[in-house]
Amino acid sequence: MKLSWSDVTPEALFLNRRSFIASLGVAAAAPALAAVEKPNSFEQITNYNNFYEFGFSKTDPADNAGQLTTDPWAVEIGGLVDRPGSYSVADLAPANAVEERIYRLRCVEAWSMVIPWLGVPLAGVLEKAGVQPGAKFVAFETLYRPEEMPEQRRRSMDWPYREGLRLDEAMHPLTILATGLYGKPMPNQNGAPIRLVVPWKYGFKSIKSIVKITLTDRQPVTTWQAMQPREYGFYANVNPQVDHPRWSQATERRIGAGLLGGRQETLMFNGYGDQVAQLYAGMDLARDY
Ligand SMILES: Nc1nc2c(c(=O)[nH]1)N[C@H]1C(S)=C(S)[C@@H](COP(=O)(O)O)O[C@H]1N2
Ligand SMILES: [Mo]
């Protein structure tokens, strides 16, 4: 089912949710989806960003990402797959397959937004590439292009930005490759032309401007875990009970809520626990943070 943002009347929103719940194939999907909050404005979503390739302040991506060339674009899919190769954005997310997903995004820095993404389930993309039986993890890499990404010309981080998921997390129906928001193509500052969105994990897992996807049997090295392993784990599930060593994760500041908006409680798995908690059954989430 396809819906543009401008089509979203309350009724259409309801229908969209129903088809999404049907696609999940689990009754447990309903509670979290019923709690759809008011999305942040396009203005807020595109002017308060983390995209360190363009600088470290929240307005640097909006100021500097305009120069990024996003067409042509190729995503190399490789490793333990039957059909490795170079895929275009249209191959991965054909227009007729793109659906709207309104998700909360919770940054590890304790701010949050609600964003109406457009995208496709990552599971479908991986199935098309043909995941081989030995694959256990998926590794992702962002573009390395210092000519267009000013912070890559400095050695401030170990570029390119890298992320990873366990295969079952990658195949989960909530995990998407997003190609747009608010019914429009993805703005450069939000990770054009294609980025990951994993709504139950801290925002840094949702890697932008992806050029490489590798299926592997080893847990991949990820940028933040490599840089500060005590502060940022591989799992990075949103968890109000496990604080960052330097600040509490119990509450968050919703961007745009204003001075009187105050802080709101952070939800376990960012409110998606009914859908994802079983992925972590038996794990100690304070150790595997
Ligand atoms: N390549 C890359 N991806 C990235 C980042 C980044 O700096 N580089 N920042 C991450 C962080 S910390 C967050 S919170 C989200 C922010 O996404 P948004 O700017 O679209 O809200 O992108 C994530 N993806
Ligand atoms: Mo973040």
Image: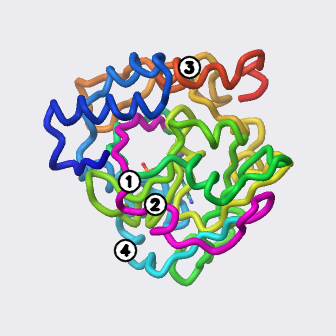
Give the CA distance from mark 1 to mark 2: 6 Å
Disc nearer the start of the sequence (2/3): 2
Residue at the disc numbered 3: 240
Q: Is mark 3 within 8 Å of ligand 2?
A: no
Mark in front: 4 vs 2: 2
Question: Does the segment drawn in magenta span residue 178?
Answer: no
Please state which of residues 85 and 67 is positioned toward the viewer in this rendering: 85
Residue at the disc numbered 2: 93
Cβ–Cβ below 8 Å for labels 1 and 2?
Answer: yes
Q: Quadrant of the C terminus?
A: top right
Mark in front: 3 vs 1: 1
Residue at the disc numbered 1: 98
Give the CA distance from mark 3 to mark 1: 32 Å
Cβ–Cβ below 8 Å for labels 4 and 3?
Answer: no
Amino acid type at image mark 2: Ala
Mark in front: 4 vs 1: 1
Please tell me whether mark 2 sits on a helix, a strand or a loop: loop
Disc nearer the start of the sequence (4/2): 4
Give the CA distance from mark 4 to mark 2: 22 Å
Q: Residue at x 71, y 66 (%)?
A: 83
Amino acid type at image mark 3: Pro
Q: Position of residue 134 (x, y in %)?
A: 85, 48
Please tell me whether mark 4 sits on a helix, a strand or a loop: helix
Q: Position of residue 22 (x, y in %)?
A: 41, 29
Q: How many marks?
A: 4
Cβ–Cβ below 8 Å for labels 3 and 1?
Answer: no
- The residue range painted magenta reads 78-106
